[in-house]
Structure formats: structure tokens, C-alpha cells
Image (cartoon, grey):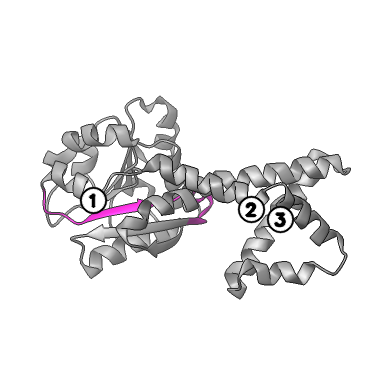
Amino acid sequence: MQGKKISIIGCGNLGLSIVKGLIDQSDFPKNNIIVTKRNTQSIQHLSDLGIEVTSNNAKAVSESDIVLISVKPYDIFNVLEEIKGSLVPGKHILISVATGISIKEIKDKIKTSIPFFRAMPNTAADVKESITCICSEGANAKDIETVNALFSIVGTPLSIKEELMESATVLGACGIAFVLRFMRAMVQGGIQIGFDSATASTIVNHTVKGAAQLIIERKQHPEFEIDKVTTPKGCTIVGLNEMEHNGFSSSLIKGIIASFEKIG
């Protein structure tokens, strides 16, 4: 990443999370970031930090080395048409985070011989905790190292096959919302059993963080850690069983599958 300039084309919620992750307590130079949006008013505050803000996508591409396209799937082909004349073989790396758009579709539109990547980060990039699933075509080892280094700044990169990118979108990106909805329900339950909202939120937030860290560091199946706190005739197993009787796991699995089928 040394000396590389990055343009983020279509700096919406996800793009903004990546920008924040890059500049927050990081050595990544702010003046090496260019962000674009059709209406720049909502991201104009970034210019005060030394980040270039523009509505000119072609200009942003020509001034950068890494081009990250962060637009809605229905906008991507218009954007590709706009920037394809500015993409230079041997200079540019193109990364798309658009859901459901294959590398082949991008290549067919661009018709330029450059390294292509698809990536699926999530909004936890904002706090440098995104899991980012990545696949590529036409990329050499140095290109892959560069893209991994970029997403390492905002979390953990993970290489996967392209046919799993839609699954990665559901599990890693939509998954943020699924976990947050679960946390919201825990907070509501906490309020009902006596806590004020702020205290319930603090307990839930740190409980979820601790549970995730246990699994990450111990590399155990979740059921292994569940067994540690489900004593015979105890309150934990009673609560778990009541949740399962009401379809807790089944509802979550069905939600994941429904999201996946929506992409397809």
C-alpha cells in the first residue's frame, strides 16, 4: 500500500465506513484518498480532513491506483461506462463491492486488461473490525497482497471462491444487521427484567463482544462454549430451550436463506 492512492467511487454508507477505517488511527495518508458521490454535500466534511471530494468519477480514477466501486448494483454499469476510458493496464486495480455483479459482467463492460477483484466488507470497517471476503481474476501475487493490505487496515481479509460471494454478502454484510437485531432483542429483554436501557445495552454489547472473542481466540465450535454455561436444571438451558421451542435457530436460518435467495 506504500504510496498507493485509492478512489472510492460512490461513497455511501459502506464507502464511508471504509474511509473512516482507513483514516482512524492509521498511517494511511488522507491525501491519498479520493471519494466521489453524485451529490457531494453529505460527504463534504471529508474535505476538511484532507480527503479529496468530487463528483467526477473519471477524474478520481485517473488520479488513483486502486479503484473501489461502492455503488448500488443497479448503478454499477453506468459508472463503469463512465470510468472505463480512464482505467490504465499496469496502473489500476479495480475492486467492486457491488452485490451480485460478477467479475465477468464487469470485464465485459470494461474491456480492459487490469486486475479485477470483488470484495464484500461490512460496515464494521468503520471500527476496523470488518470481515472482508475477496475473490479475484487476472491478479498477480503483488496485486493480491496490495488488496489484502488495504482490507487489513479495516479488519480481516478472507479469500474465497467467487461462487460464494453472494453467500458472503448474506453472512458477513447482512449478518451485521442480523446480529444487531438479536442484540436489540436482548436489550429489550434486559429492560423487562429490571435494567434501564443504557445499562442493559452495556451488558449486552460486552457480552456479545466477549462471546465473539471467545470463539475467535479459542477456535472452538459455539456449542463447546454453550456447554460450559448450561448446567443441569439451570436457568441457561431453560432459556435456550424456550427460545428453540419458539423457533429461534430456525428463524435465523430461514432469514439467512431468504436473504440469499433475494440476491439470486
Neighbourhood count class around disc 2 (C-alpha, 10 Å): few under 14, some 14–19, many 20 upward: few
Q: Position of residue 154 (x, y in %)?
A: 45, 55
Q: Residue 162 sits in which quadrant?
A: bottom left
Q: Where is residue 40 in the image (x, y as percent from the top left)?
A: 37, 27
Amino acid type of the residue tagged 2 in the rendering:
Ser
Residue designated by label 3: 206
* CA distance separating discs 1 and 3: 39 Å
On the question of residue 1 being in view, the answer is no
Q: Give the range drawn in magenta.
A: 112-130
Q: Position of residue 227 (x, y in %)?
A: 74, 70
Amino acid type of the residue tagged 1 in the rendering:
Ile
Residue designated by label 1: 103
Which element is circle 1 on?
A: helix
Amino acid type of the residue tagged 3 in the rendering:
His
Q: Residue 261 sits in which quadrant?
A: top left
Which element is circle 3 on?
A: helix
